[in-house]
């Protein structure tokens, strides 16, 4: 089959490539989520990947920094109670099922990391550095635990962009990425009988 195309090689594109490569999030049996209601829900179908469960049910009642309930759900699974200043370990365990791999290519103007490569290197992120990490690779492990006094929990664009670039290599995703690529237009192509009908001025309704 022809590969699907993802436009943009920033953190969202990288994470999606990781999941399209067959990685699925499961509840880590060695962890306990501090939200007892959510943890009880997670226990009900712990044999299934989180993405195969009822996400609306799991995210019901959760509050966070996003209006997207699924985003809030995954935020709290990756960084439980982070908004309250805690650093609990993630409750997700990522397992790969090669049969679930979906061929795809990620197109980007530069190297993996997207717009982070173009930002001023001396700035600091508003979000904590660990909130910028992607599944399966600890942010501090790749940045050597660099500390900067009062601002030690925040990161520079250079650190973030380097983390994303190294993440792609560590997870073996390089084959999915096509760097230095510009997409100038997208067109929908009609094929088969429908295309012939359109060329001849016909539609499903006739005429």
Image (cartoon, rainbow, N blue to C red):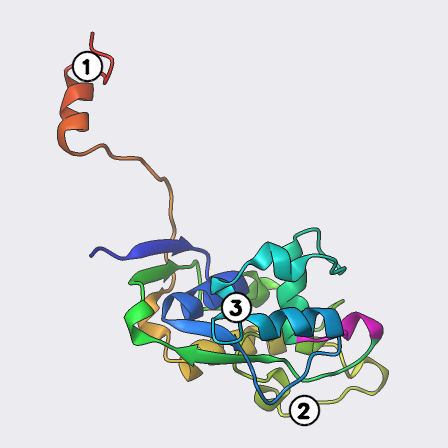
**Which-is-in-front pick, marks 3 and 1?**
3
In this picture, is 89 found above or below 84? below
Q: CA distance from mark 3 to mark 1?
A: 46 Å
Q: Which numbered marker is on residue 202?
A: 1
SS type, badge 1: loop
| Sequence order check, earlier mark of 3 and 2 | 3
Q: Which numbered marker is on residue 50?
A: 3
Residue at the limit of the structure toward the top, as seen here: 207
Q: Is the residue marked by circle 3 packed among few (<14), some (14-19), or many (20+) residues within 10 Å? A: some
Label 2 with label 1: CB-CB less than 8 Å: no
Q: Nearer the viewer, residue 90 or 188?
A: 90
In this picture, is 58 found above or below 80? above
Q: Which numbered marker is on residue 145?
A: 2
Q: Quadrant of residue 181?
A: bottom left
Image point (47%, 63%), residue name: 52
Q: Nearer the viewer, residue 86 or 144?
A: 86
Instruction: Report whether 24 appears left or right of 163.
Output: left
| Sequence order check, earlier mark of 3 and 1 | 3
Image point (37%, 74%), residue name: 173
Image point (58%, 71%), residue name: 44
Residue at the limit of the structure toward the front, as seen here: 44
Q: Is the residue marked by circle 2 packed among few (<14), some (14-19), or many (20+) residues within 10 Å? A: few
- Magenta region: 79-84
Q: Is residue 121 visible?
A: no
Q: Is residue 189 visible?
A: yes
SS type, badge 2: loop
Q: Quadrant of residue 88?
A: bottom right
In this picture, is 147 found above or below 176? below
């Amino acid at each position: 089959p022809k590969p699907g195309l993802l436009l943009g090689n920033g953190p969202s594109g990288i994470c999606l490539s990781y999941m399209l490569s067959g990685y699925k999030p499961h509840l880590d049996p060695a962890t306990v989520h501090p939200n007892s209601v959510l943890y009880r829900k997670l226990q009900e179908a712990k044999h299934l990947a989180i993405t195969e469960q009822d996400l609306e049910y799991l995210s019901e009642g959760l509050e966070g920094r996003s209006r997207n309930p699924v985003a809030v759900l995954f935020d709290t699974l990756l960084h439980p109670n982070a908004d309250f200043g805690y650093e609990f370990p993630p409750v997700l365990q990522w397992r790969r099922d090669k049969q679930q791999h979906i061929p795809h290519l990620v197109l980007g103007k530069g190297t993996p990391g997207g717009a982070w490569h173009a930002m001023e290197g001396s700035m600091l992120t508003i979000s904590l550095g660990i909130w910028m990490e992607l599944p399966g690779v600890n942010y501090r492990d790749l940045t050597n635990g660099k500390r900067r006094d009062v601002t030690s929990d925040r990161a520079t664009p250079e650190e973030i962009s380097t983390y994303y670039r190294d993440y792609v290599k560590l997870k073996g995703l390089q084959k999915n990425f096509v760097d230095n690529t510009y997409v100038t237009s997208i067109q929908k192509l009609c094929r088969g009988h429908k295309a012939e009908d359109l060329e001849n001025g016909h539609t499903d309704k006739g005429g």
